[in-house]
Image: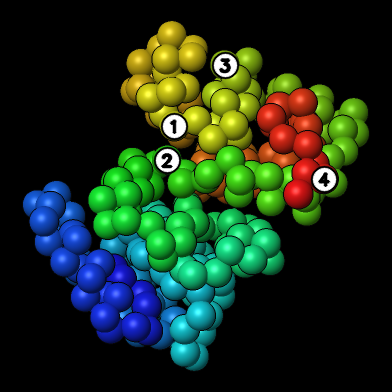
Amino acid sequence: MIADDHSLLREAIRHAFDQHKDIEVVAEVDDGVEAVRLSSELRPDVVIMDIMMPRLNGIEATKQIRKLTPTTAVLILTGYDDDRYVIGLLEAGAAGYLLKSTQGQSLVRAVRAVYDGEAILHPALIGKILRYTTFTEPADRISETKELLSKREKDVLKLATRGMNNKSIAEELFVTVGTVKAHLSSIFSKMEVASRTEAIVKGMREGWITQEDVPFEKNKK
């Protein structure tokens, strides 16, 4: 489903998807309220969401969609790269964040990726999260994590935090992509999240992922 208040952009996105038989646009909406309503009714696999829309903005619409239809992945496509929007949308449960300067084929690849359970998190976005995250390592939380996740699950989560996709993680750990997906599914269940993005954000917020796990300095601009 495409949610954007600019009809020409919706038409361009639909045209990009029309070239691919494995992707079907089931609906187009021009405001956040309709995006939530139709998501609940149609339960699309992926919603492409703008931030600034009439009646309900993309952040609130994403929160409601993730609550009503947790199996729906929300991919943000916007002209805004402000830190506040990035953090707010990732915390709301968005699976990815792309700018409207993205080329059509890149958008198609992104939709396939979030449908496959991957997060579209450019390393620069992780850097933005770090600037707003206070890393703490209380003993009880570190102990809880060790008991919560297996060693291999922790390895997978840390590599995901570095922006690696399933294929790259599989190559790094010398396992199959299917094994990585199975580990991620287990991680989501144990952490009570629905996506890789939520797992990364929660891991940072809870102190389960440390600064040493991420190849960025916290205050790097």
Which label lies toward us, 3 or 2?
2
Which label lies toward us, 1 or 4?
4
Label 3: few (<14), some or many (≥20) within 10 Å? few
Q: Quadrant of the N terminus?
A: bottom left
Q: Earlier in the sequence, mark 2 or mark 1?
A: 2
Q: Residue at left 90%, top 34%?
A: 138
Q: Residue at left 81%, top 28%?
A: 142
State the image coordinates of residue 78 (x, y, percent, origin top left). 47, 68
Q: Which mark is residue 198?
A: none
Q: CA distance from mark 3 to mark 4?
A: 29 Å
Q: Choose top left, top right, bottom left or bottom right for residue 19.
A: bottom left
State the image coordinates of residue 166 (x, y, percent, origin top left). 41, 28
Q: CA distance from mark 2 to mark 4?
A: 27 Å
Label 4: few (<14), some or many (≥20) within 10 Å? few
| Kind of residue at badge 1 | Asn
Tag 4 residue: 219
Tag 3 residue: 152
* Colouring mode (rainbow / by chain / secondary structure / one colour): rainbow
Tag 2 residue: 118
| Residue sitting farthest toward the right | 138
